[in-house]
Amino acid sequence: MMHLTEGGTLYDRIGPERLHDLLTRFYAHVRATPDLAAIFPGDWDTTLEKQEAFMTGFTGGPPLYHERYGHPRLRARHLPFPVTPSRARLWLACMRRALDDTLGIDRDTAAELYAALTRVATHMVNTPEPTPEEVPA
């Protein structure tokens, strides 16, 4: 859960409509990034729904993910997917573009959310980069 700052939680400052807009833009960028899209299950509606529930609680809003799906156990849920350092950077780049494209999220709020998600992305890395011999030609 995010800390309260002047103006409330990140969720208070972003709001549910803007959070939905942000995540819709984010997944459009992810789908357009082949190396990332390859590790997503392909059901983008369900993926968006789960991410929105998670991000609502993560940013200080209602604990929707916990209520619907139980504890997020982020790292454990992502272990089946090879999350390399480069994929974590691509994920963050998609989020950066989505934050830049979403109207109504001020710079300070965007920077705070991005910093928090940077820590999450770093934590999610579970696979080293492939060696040159392992990269398909």
Image (tube, helix red, strand yellow):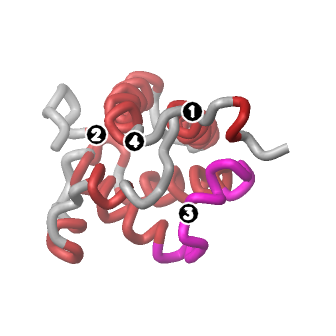
The answer to whether residue 100 is visible is no
Region in magenta:
31-46
Question: Which dot marks residue 129?
Answer: 1
Q: What's the residue type where badge 3 is placed?
A: Phe
Q: Inspect the magenta stretch and tell me whether residue 89 lies in it.
A: no
Q: Amino acid at mark 2?
A: Leu
Depicted 35 relative to depicted 133: above or below: below
> From the viewer's perspective, is residue 6 above or below residue 102?
above
Q: Earlier in the sequence, mark 2 or mark 4?
A: 2
> Which SS class for mark 3?
loop
Check disc 2 and report its element: helix, strand or loop. helix
Cα distance, mark 2 to mark 3? Answer: 26 Å
Q: Position of residue 65 (x, y in %)?
A: 24, 66
Q: Which residue is mark 2?
A: 10
The residue under label 1 is which amino acid type? Glu
Query: Residue 115's mark?
Result: none
Q: Residue at x 48, y 66 (%)?
A: 48
Rendering coords of residue 68 (x, y %): 22, 77
The span from disc 3 to disc 1 (Cα, nearest Å) is 18 Å
35 relative position to 119: left or right: right
Q: Nearer the viewer, mark 2 or mark 1?
A: 1
Where disc 1 sits, the SS reads loop
Q: Which callout, 3 or 4, points at the residue further toward the start of the chain?
A: 3
Above or below residue 43? Residue 116 is above
Give percent across and percent down for residue 49. Answer: 42, 71
Which residue is denoted by mark 4 in the rendering?
126
Q: Looking at the rendered structure, which numbered label has been put on residue 40?
A: 3
How many C-alpha atoms fall within 10 Å of the one at disc 4: few (<14), some, or many (≥20)? some
Of the two numbered discs 3 and 1 in the rendering, the one whose residue sits closer to the viewer: 1
Q: Dividing the picture into quarters, in which one does residue 96 lie?
A: top right
C-alpha span from label 2 to label 1:
33 Å
Q: Is residue 37 magenta?
A: yes
